Image (spheres, rainbow, N blue to C red):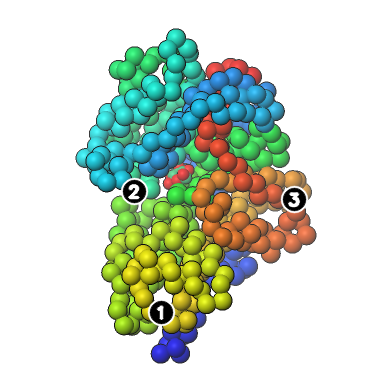
Amino acid sequence: MAGVLTEKIKDLKQQFRLSASQIIDIATKFESEMVAGLASHGSLKMLRTFMQKPGGKETGTFITIDFGGTNIRLQLVNLLGKGRYEIIRQQSFLLKHPYGAYDYTSQEAAAEDLFDFIAVQIGELAEQGQTYPLGLTFSFPCRQLEANRAVLISWTKEFKTSGVEGQEITGLLEKALAKRGLSQVIPAAIINDTTGTLLAASYGNPHADIGSICGTGHNTCYLEPMEPATRVPMMINMESGNFNKFPLTTYDQALDRASEKPGEQLLEKAVSGRYIGEVARLILQDMTQARLLFQANPPGFVANINSITAGDLAQILADDTQDLTRISHLLKTNGNILILTTEELKALKTIASLVATRSARLVAATYIGILRHIDPGLTQQHVIGVDGSLFEKMPGYRTMVQEVLQEIYQDKADRISLVLTKDGSGVGAAIAAATCAGRR
Ligand code: BGC
């Protein structure tokens, strides 16, 4: 039995490990897709943002909305210039009630319900008689018409709200604000969260030219030295979660088939927090069916879609006890599994590690693709601002991304800094609003 389990783990390692030469191959393909995307073909949408690097002199008070997942965050942000800011007030609310009382992300909810709900919350933050420029971070693929007008191309991250795809988002919000008598709140900019992260990273650091999210979703934005239509430098939201030129395992294929939008967002489905727990669950399901794990009593959760989260993987990876007692405890409390052999516990940790490591290495490969495009000889300093729960909380994630940069660039790797950029969606949106409201 132990032998068969060892063989299976070996096979999984083969499927999930990415060698340095595979990384280079993926980076090369990524770079070609960038070039193709700028010419409007291929898997990368390469969306214009109308944003350039901030000058650092943007100041003022702004309302910002961070709309990128089921938890929406509103902030009142005061920009003080040169990278300094303060968050005066903030509040969060859920689009999906934990016990099912409402769900504004479901197909049954209409655009109007969703934006009315958001406007009510804005009403609680805005003071009467005061005018607020608003920066909206809307973290889904949008075709930007101008700095404060953007059309949702398609939902991602399993959102399904009706009547939003194909619509101009700021207009929907303005209508809802007007209904509540909130015309003193004026949408000045709409940006993607990756753009917000890049704006926030470059507010205080002139070397920042890449902004990325490794959280529930995944995507990256960079400063294109020459945007083809305008022929000036412009931040480009790549929608890199849709990249698809990398090796897929049978588990990725199964996950994709069962998803809301099969064939789309394949990179995001292999790397992001919304999906990697499910990749691990599909592996466990396969191993349970082959009677390699949980033989005595297969637990119910193994058969239940989305029953493992990225947070569970983080807990598994954080267990560095010799007997993996924390993993045992987790399984006892969450899965009612009382007995597991040391081999089985080790196998669980290996699975979590393979999935998380592949995520970090794939993400790093895309960063290398971008760096090759903007600075082929890596002669400059680059700051990559990254936000998101995976980057911040998955044990070892950031180090693994860094290691790939080291493997590929060797002694030049110190020209690249990976910087955790918190609050990109709030501060970045305020900077965008300041730029557009002409407060430079
Ligand atoms: C969206 C991107 C977003 C990313 C991170 C993806 O699902 O398509 O627009 O930047 O999630 O939030």
Q: Is residue 54 left or right of residue 363?
A: right
First in residue order: circle 3 vs circle 1: 1
**Looking at the image, is 128 positioned above or below residue 201?**
above
Q: Which residue is mark 3?
A: 415
Q: Which residue is mark 2?
A: 158
Q: CA distance from mark 3 to mark 1?
A: 46 Å
Disc 2 beta carbon < 8 A from ligand 1?
A: no
Residue 38 appears in the picture as rendered: no
Q: Which residue is mark 1?
A: 340
At 31% from the left and 66% from the top, the residue drawn is: 301
Disc 3 beta carbon < 8 A from ligand 1?
A: no
Query: Label 2 crowding class (10 Å Cα cut-off): few <14, some 14-19, many 20+?
Result: few
Which mark is drawn over residue 422?
A: none
Q: Residue furthest left?
A: 108
At 30% from the left and 26% from the top, the residue drawn is: 116
First in residue order: circle 1 vs circle 2: 2
Kindly identify the amino acid type of the residue bearing the numbered disc 3. Answer: Arg
Could you tell me which secondary element the residue under label 2 belongs to? loop
